[in-house]
Amino acid sequence: MALKIKDVTLLKGERIDDLQCKGLGIIQNPDGFCFGVDAVLLSHFAHVRNNDRCLDLCSGTGIVPILMHGLNEERNAKYLGIEIQDTSVDMASRSVEMNGIKDFVHITKGDVKEAAAIVDAASFQLVTVNPPYMAASKALKNPTLPKTIARHEVMCDLRDVIRAASFALAKKGRFYMVHKPSRLAEIIAVMKEFNIEPKTMRMVHPYIDKEPVLVLIGGIKDGGVEMRVLAPLVLYEEQGVYTEELKSIYGISE
């Protein structure tokens, strides 16, 4: 489907990427941080229901709420993205305007550690987050750079995002996150600490015979104890060749 976007002013270094979904596009700057497959997989993994209020933490340039709106347009859900970096908030907001979806998606500047000052308690049915994966290191030379903030826990950590999600979620609200498998034990422990019961999990493998590189995990606020482990999601048949499932997720047709 061709892009269906309004006129937009691009700043130096910016480009518009086609999301291959309902004619939506997104403004990005390769010199900053561009979204990857993890954000796309999270957007597909999250289950949106009719008239949901959805919150996306660590929203970056808005890829998750924008794509989730496109994937679930008929659900009439509303999305709020919270992002701490000014440049990302600006790009995300212009992407929302460019796509003509401001009645459904809004991006605001904020710190997830101060969620209580941004949103009301128990006011969302769904929370998503694609957080920084790597623990902060004193060896980081440029901890204020956009790529560093997106990848390393310099502005917030795992506990911060799960605490914020628990605060924002209504009882029985759904939580969805993508992260690294190496931190799975910690993820489950922190989710349970903040009363988000792990309910679904899916490992993401680059190839069928390789170890997973990502984990998709979903939970329910104040949910009962029982978790379903889904079949693995494999990205490549061989080098440079997507699996049929990934082609379907990306909207690629032969």
Image: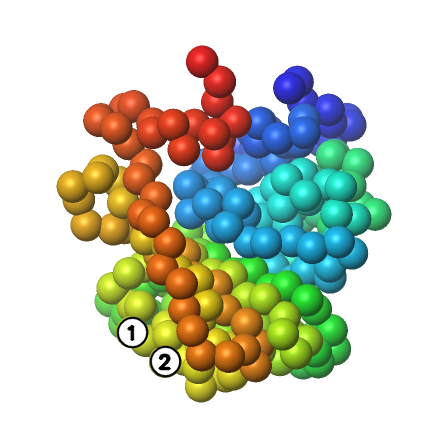
Position of residue 42 in the picture relative to residue 234 (left or right): right
Position of residue 68 in the picture relative to residue 178 (left or right): right
Residue lying farthest bottom? 193
Which residue is the site of mark 2?
Answer: 189
Residue 93 appears in the picture as rendered = yes
Q: Residues within 10 Å of mark 2 (few under 14, many from 20)?
A: few
Q: Position of residue 158 (x, y in %)?
A: 42, 73
Residue plotted at (41% across, 33% down)? 245
Compared to residue 90, the image places residue 119 above or below, namely below
Compared to residue 166, the image places residue 31 above or below, namely above
Which residue is the site of mark 1?
Answer: 185
- Residue 244 sits in which quadrant? top left
Position of residue 162 in the picture relative to residue 125 (left or right): left
Residue plotted at (29% across, 74% down)? 185
Question: Is label 2 in contact with label 1 (beta carbons under 8 Å)?
Answer: yes
Residue 59 appears in the picture as rendered = no
Number of numbered discs visible in the structure rendering: 2
Compared to residue 24, the image places residue 139 above or below, namely below
Q: Amino acid at mark 2?
A: Ala
**Real-space CA distance between mark 2 and mark 1, rounded to the nearest whole angstrom:** 6 Å
